Image (tube, helix red, strand yellow):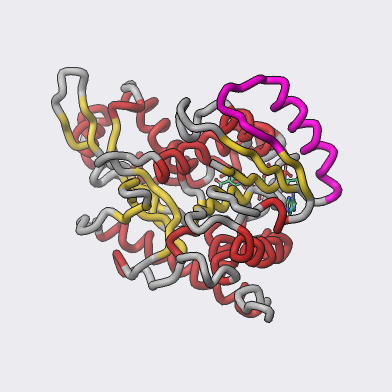
Amino acid sequence: MKVTVTGAGGQIGYALLFRIASGAMFGPGTSVDLRLVEIPAGMKSAEGTALELVDCAFGTLNSVEVTDDPTQGFDGTNVALLVGARPRGPGMERADLLTANGAIFAPQGAAINAAAADDVRVLVVGNPANTNALIASAHAPDVPAQRFTAMTRLDHNRALARLALTLEVPVKALSNVIIWGNHSSTQVPDITHGLLTSSDGTTRHLSDVLQEKLGGSTAVGSWLTESFIPGVAKRGAEIITVRGSSSAASAAAAAVDHVHDWVVGTQDAWTSAGVVSDGSYNVPQGLISSFPVRGQHGNLEIVQGLSVDPEVRARIDRSVQELIEEREMVTALGLLTRKR
Ligand code: NAD
Ligand code: LMR
């Protein structure tokens, strides 16, 4: 597997590259060729990281190259992780980064179109991830739109972790939790289809388990609207406040999970990912929005036919409206128009 990571000299790059090289993304039987892409100002940091990668003597690391030329970095790549972008600071929304970061993703989409392998899969991590993925995809007309995805796996993992803590159960006992919409504070963590499987194999709806734990449906409703949903949606801002800079190791772990489940598969299990809408769940076709997905046949396939609770529906509509507004903004900035 040839894997390209942009922003390789940054915080997430430093947490991500060692996990990919150690076999966490594709398993111990697949060796990787790493391509580290930076801007000139980040080259020294990426070069230092490359030296350390070599020193780890990972059995699954075949080669490491560092470049500030995106076409060289994406040459023949099978998996492109677009991390390189500015992170937000305290008090900013992720969409505030559109003007600064949007311009990065048009030339990178064009370089992927020109140089990447035919089976390239792209994960956009740099914020605002959904709309940046849309920009990159618009500049790669020869790559199927389904191959451009945006990372909402960190939100998904945050939702699982918060539920596990509240219910005092292991994360692995939880399934069918969903993140819908934008990777922003309007995202929609949804537990209405969630399940808890006990160690004896019995499965119960999360809503019933929560009612038992919290003392009835009113208490669950308040917990969802006052604690769970805003807690997950604003966790990125909380990390920035507490840590002084945006999440890095948990973002890297989520990127590993996203690509692993895309390439290796999830069997029947669901996860969440920002993928191009085919009109499912009334999300306008072409927008990159988070859905429940399964990793099957090398694709991230939207889980179809789920009932959507009216309150969840209203939240999805608000998040989708925000994605539409972001698309309008980047259209006005000319970022969706390909240069000839
Ligand atoms: P960072 O500032 O530590 O590193 C970013 C790196 O990108 C820098 O080394 C910079 O030189 C490089 N870079 C900038 N422009 C580039 C370009 N055109 N090509 C290649 N490299 C380039 O930031 P970070 O903490 O690693 O975060 C990176 C991005 O990921 C931010 O936009 C952040 O908001 C986002 N993020 C997203 C999620 C998510 O869940 N989707 C989670 C965490 C962070
Ligand atoms: C996150 O969710 O932690 C990242 O998107 C960083 C941020 O700006 O919140």
Q: Quadrant of residue 13?
A: top right
Asked whether residue 278 is drawn in magenta, I would say no
Residue 228, visible in the rendered structure: no
Residue 213, relative to residue 13: is it above or below? above
Horizontally, residue 139 falls left or right of residue 213, namely right
Residue at the location (62% across, 51% down)?
82
> 133 or 216: which is nearer to us?
133
> 6 or 273: which is nearer to us?
6
Residue 333, relative to residue 102: is it above or below? below
* Residue 325 picture location, percent across and down: 53, 72
Asked whether residue 42 is drawn in magenta, I would say yes
* Residue 44 picture location, percent across and down: 85, 38
Residue at the location (37% across, 61% down)?
316
* Residue 136 picture location, percent across and down: 59, 64
Residue at the location (55% across, 61% down)?
133
For the image, the number of numbered tags is 0
Segment tinted magenta in the rendering = 40-64
Residue 46, visible in the rendered structure: yes
Horizontally, residue 303 falls left or right of residue 183, namely left
Residue 48, relative to residue 179: is it above or below? above
Horizontally, residue 74 falls left or right of residue 78, namely right
Residue 193, relative to residue 302: is it above or below? above
* Residue 259 picture location, percent across and down: 47, 43
> 237 or 202: which is nearer to us?
202
**The C terminus, quarter of image:** bottom right
Residue at the location (45% across, 55% down)?
274
Of helix, strand and loop, which mostly describes the magenta segment? Answer: helix
